Image (cartoon, rainbow, N blue to C red):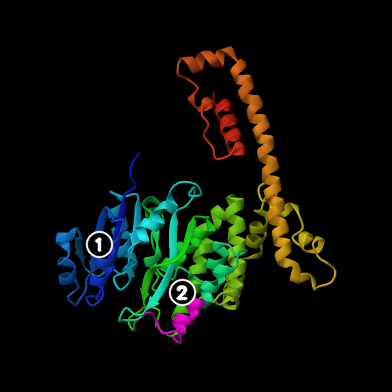
Amino acid sequence: MKQTRLAVIIPCYNHAHYVGKAIESVLDQTRPPDLFLVIDDGSKDNSVEVIRSYEDRGVKLLVQENAGAHNTLNRAAKIAAEQCDLISILNSDDFYEPQRFEKCLPLFEGEGSEGTQVVVTGLTMIDPDNEPLATEESRAKWLRAVWSMAKDADLSIWEWMGIANFPVTSSNIIARADYLCANPFRPYRFNHDYFFLSGAAIRGGIRLLEECLLNYRVHPENNINSAPAPLLKEMLRMHLDLYHDYAGEVEADPAVRRRFYQYMAATQSSISSFHPGLFQLLLAKLAAKSDEATLESLINSLDESSIDELNDYPNKALVNTWDEKTPVFHGAALAEKFEVLKRERNGLKAELRATQELAKLRNELLKNKGRALTSLLGGGSKITSDAGKGAVEKLANLREALGSD
């Protein structure tokens, strides 16, 4: 069995004071990486000299003209993906706990790992002297508030991401190399990690290990230290980009659509500088730029044969689960659980029907002498294939193969 290969990439810009600690935290891992790449993004201090002092311990250094954090990360990811299956990002002012890779990598393998594209962990905020951030510091209080939601068993990862960027930083990303390269970081100043992580969550691709295995440094040079307006505007743009980039997947995939609905509903309670009122204002301004024909065409593009939500009333579950004692909207969470269970039941019924139909078709194929001869001669591989995640998908693949056979 092929061994999973892991790369660590560190983008560095003017962090000579911190980058040595970051590098040593990688070299001290109980499960060492297979590739360790540091790209200096045009530092004006002596970062390059510090990094170069570790080259004899396996650190590969690339030096480039300043291109910005997102470009540097995207370049490093492409280089690392040529040799490795997984990529871990570490910013040059943060550092890992020694067992981060040993504990995180198993989450990409074995039971429950299907569909996992990204793994994140708990984290500790530290000050410039490597000490935990004082509890009275506003950032430390924010982190405690965000992670208090980890105790809510009913809160999904994508809803949690809608409320707050709980992984906090790109240093908290360990990702499959092909996924990272297929979803490059955008040219945001503050939110390239948030956009990437929100997208992965909406696709159901994030797994969480709550243990604190990352140290995130808070210091005066952090990007996040700025006036509110630039951050609020970028957060609004980021969510417009989510609408734009994920529209196709949201329409085509009911599971992605459900997670997207829940993510966006959760943003109404955001504690990550997303202003839901301003976002509604932007949507109103976008609608105002469209003429009547465009709006009508947009509505008519919703097809009830592929979008199941059009075939039932959205308030039905809420009313049917109402206890007639408390105000009706207090039962919204119960109504949502009711809808989830109903979808699961319908999914199980569809799987059962598909299993029965699949068994019937396969039995008929076994009785077909011409098909048996073709199989004996090495033909019909698509028909004999068992490709598909479940009975519904296997049946669809078999029908498609029979149609073209």
Type of amino acid under label 2:
Glu
Q: Residue at x 30, y 81 (%)?
A: 129
The crowding category of the residue bearing disc 1, from other C-alpha atoms within 10 Å (few below 14, some 14 to 19, many at least 20), is: some
Mark seen at residue 204: none
- Rendered view: 405 above or below 18: above
Quadrant where the N terminus lies?
top left
Q: Residue furthest bottom?
A: 136
| Horizontal side of residue 185 vs 113, given as left or right | left
Q: Residue furthest right?
A: 324
Residue 272: x %, y % from top left: 51, 75
Type of amino acid under label 1:
Leu
- Mark in the foreground, 1 or 2: 1
Where residue 393 sits, quadrant-wise, is: top right
Mark seen at residue 27: 1
Q: Residue at x 57, y 65 (%)?
A: 159
The crowding category of the residue bearing disc 2, from other C-alpha atoms within 10 Å (few below 14, some 14 to 19, many at least 20), is: some
| Horizontal side of residue 323 vs 34, given as left or right | right
Residue 127: x %, y % from top left: 35, 81
Q: Residue at x 58, y 12 (%)?
A: 369
First along the sequence among labels 1 and 2: 1
Q: CA distance from mark 1 to mark 2?
A: 35 Å
The magenta-colored residue range is 132-144
Q: Nearer the viewer, residue 237 or 32?
A: 32
Quadrant where the C terminus lies?
top right
Q: Nearer the viewer, residue 134 or 287?
A: 134
Q: Is residue 136 magenta?
A: yes
| Callout 1 touching callout 2 (CB < 8 Å) | no
Q: Is residue 102 magenta?
A: no
Circle 2 residue: 234
| Horizontal side of residue 45 vs 30, given as left or right | left
Whether residue 98 is visible: yes
- Rendered view: 400 above or below 109: above
